[in-house]
């Protein structure tokens, strides 16, 4: 496994088969009973949109409960941060996400606050709805949390059965928490938008723009497992990382004209763009024309437009922009598509098998205790990620967050003017 900072993995005592069965039976019963009694929990919340200063620790957050037959209640052992958490903290997507939350609550919630961030979770099931068939209390699971649901920077999180997957047995919770969001995003982009899969990648050439972060490093490993040739862009000091997870060709975007350098290479079948901006003007030219090649960008204007223009005008404006660019690229013989993050438990089942066979490795750049969530946000906001930033939740949450008073000062410091841009 590629771990750039040490993670503590607790040793497990060996049990006999009968002893293990008895222990698990008692554990599942006690977990389920405890979950029904807990009404409050520890969590990091925001009560308004803004910079790091809006993050607030509380021990009085409302604990989720089983409210429908397909609900799965999970005790969080580890979570991780993604750029979307920084964006959502500042209000990104608030119009559409509030609408989705209102639909879930049948319009009973006048305000979206407080909001719990965190899109990755690895933990243990503590209770299940009556219709759940794939999980029982005591199961170790992982999941990507939909952005309209309360997140994983808390003791407990509630998801539907179809959003949850059994955690790979070969990973600790800290390692596992680094994977679900980037896996769900990468698979949605590469498979749903890019048309790639394990059965058609053997002769494909794929370019990943901005490959040293979580989505990039996961995508490299997935594509190599499927047999594709992978070219990536990153800075010089990330070359060892991306080559270590399988990249065939690496172009340093800081060394000169990256478009010209890539233009000297053989054309590509798919371009996955994690950066956006100016790259969408030159990257489609790197594709094989009139052969079904696709440019897929994960940087779309949809949520930003609905935030600034409202739901109707923002949606219409985004649709028109997509249509115009797509038609322009089709005239040049290539497809232009948007990729979106799509949580999916069954997809993570497939990823779990790839992990347990050694074809996908977690890439963790840094780990933080639950008390230092604001510092973890500050670290991520620094940009130039080399893997994932993970939060260890379970132990400190159960101990009542001893030492949180000292962290509150760091919260205000981390929200200063130097930590506003998301790279």
Image: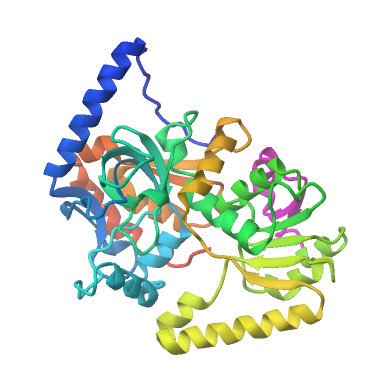
Please count the marks in the image. Answer: 0
Q: What stretch is highlighted in magenta?
A: 230-256
Quadrant in the picture for residue 116: bottom left
Q: x and y percent of residue 170 in the render?
A: 50, 28
Based on the picture, tell me whether residue 248 belongs to the magenta stretch.
yes
Viewer-closest of 383 and 271: 271
Considering every residue shown, the one lying at the far top of the view is 16
Quadrant in the picture for residue 265: bottom right
Viewer-closest of 175 and 341: 341
Q: Is residue 256 above or below residue 403?
A: below
Task: Report if residue 17 is visible in the image.
Answer: yes
Considering every residue shown, the one lying at the far bottom of the view is 313
Report the residue at 82% width, 50% height from top.
203
Q: x and y percent of residue 344 in the render?
A: 47, 53
Tell whether 286 sits left or right of 235. right
Image quadrant occupied by the N terminus: top right
Task: Report if residue 363 is visible in the image.
Answer: no
Q: x and y percent of residue 122 in the render?
A: 39, 41
Report the residue at 33% width, 52% height from top.
159
Tell whether 321 sits left or right of 404. right
Q: In this view, does 359 lie above or below 102?
A: above
Quadrant in the picture for residue 127: top left
Q: In this view, does 248 lie above or below 107?
A: above
Based on the picture, tell me whether residue 52 belongs to the magenta stretch.
no
Viewer-closest of 33 and 407: 33
Viewer-closest of 169 and 374: 169
């Amino acid at each position: 496994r590629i771990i750039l900072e040490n993670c503590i993995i607790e040793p497990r005592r060996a049990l006999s088969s009968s002893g293990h069965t008895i222990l698990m039976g008692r554990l599942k019963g006690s977990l389920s009973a405890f979950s029904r009694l807990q009404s409050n929990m520890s969590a990091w919340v925001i009560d308004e949109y803004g910079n790091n200063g809006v993050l607030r620790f509380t021990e009085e957050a409302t604990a989720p409960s089983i409210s429908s037959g397909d609900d799965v209640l999970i005790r969080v052992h580890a979570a991780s941060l993604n750029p979307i958490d920084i964006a959502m903290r500042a209000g990104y997507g608030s119009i559409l996400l509030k609408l989705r939350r209102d639909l879930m609550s049948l319009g009973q919630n006048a305000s979206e606050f407080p909001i719990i961030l965190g899109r990755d979770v690895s933990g243990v099931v503590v209770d299940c709805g009556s219709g759940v068939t794939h999980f029982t209390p005591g199961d170790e699971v992982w999941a990507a949390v939909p952005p309209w649901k309360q997140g994983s920077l808390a003791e407990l999180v509630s998801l539907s059965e179809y959003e949850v997957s059994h955690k790979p047995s070969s990973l600790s919770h800290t390692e596992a928490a680094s994977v679900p969001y980037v896996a769900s995003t990468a698979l949605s982009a590469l498979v749903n938008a890019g048309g790639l899969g394990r059965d058609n990648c053997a002769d494909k050439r794929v370019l990943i723009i901005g490959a040293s972060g979580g989505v990039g490093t996961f995508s490299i490993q997935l594509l190599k497992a499927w047999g594709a040739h992978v070219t990536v862009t990153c800075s010089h000091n990330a070359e060892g990382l991306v080559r270590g997870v399988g990249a065939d060709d690496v172009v340093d975007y800081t060394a000169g004209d990256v478009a010209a350098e890539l233009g000297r290479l053989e054309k590509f079948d798919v371009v996955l763009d994690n950066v956006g901006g100016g790259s969408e003007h030159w990257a489609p030219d790197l594709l094989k024309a009139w052969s079904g090649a696709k440019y897929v960008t994960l940087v779309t204007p949809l949520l930003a437009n609905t935030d600034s223009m409202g739901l109707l005008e923002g949606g219409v404006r985004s649709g028109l922009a997509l249509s115009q660019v797509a038609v322009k690229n089709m005239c040049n013989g290539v497809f232009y598509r948007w990729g979106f993050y799509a949580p999916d438990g069954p997809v993570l089942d497939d990823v779990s098998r790839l992990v347990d066979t050694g074809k996908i490795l977690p890439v963790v750049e840094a780990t933080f205790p639950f008390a230092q969530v604001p510092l973890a946000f500050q670290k991520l906001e620094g940009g130039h990620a080399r893997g994932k930033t993970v939060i260890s939740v379970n132990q400190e949450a159960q101990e009542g967050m001893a030492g949180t008073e000292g962290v509150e000062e760091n919260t205000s410091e981390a929200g200063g003017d130097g930590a506003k841009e998301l790279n």
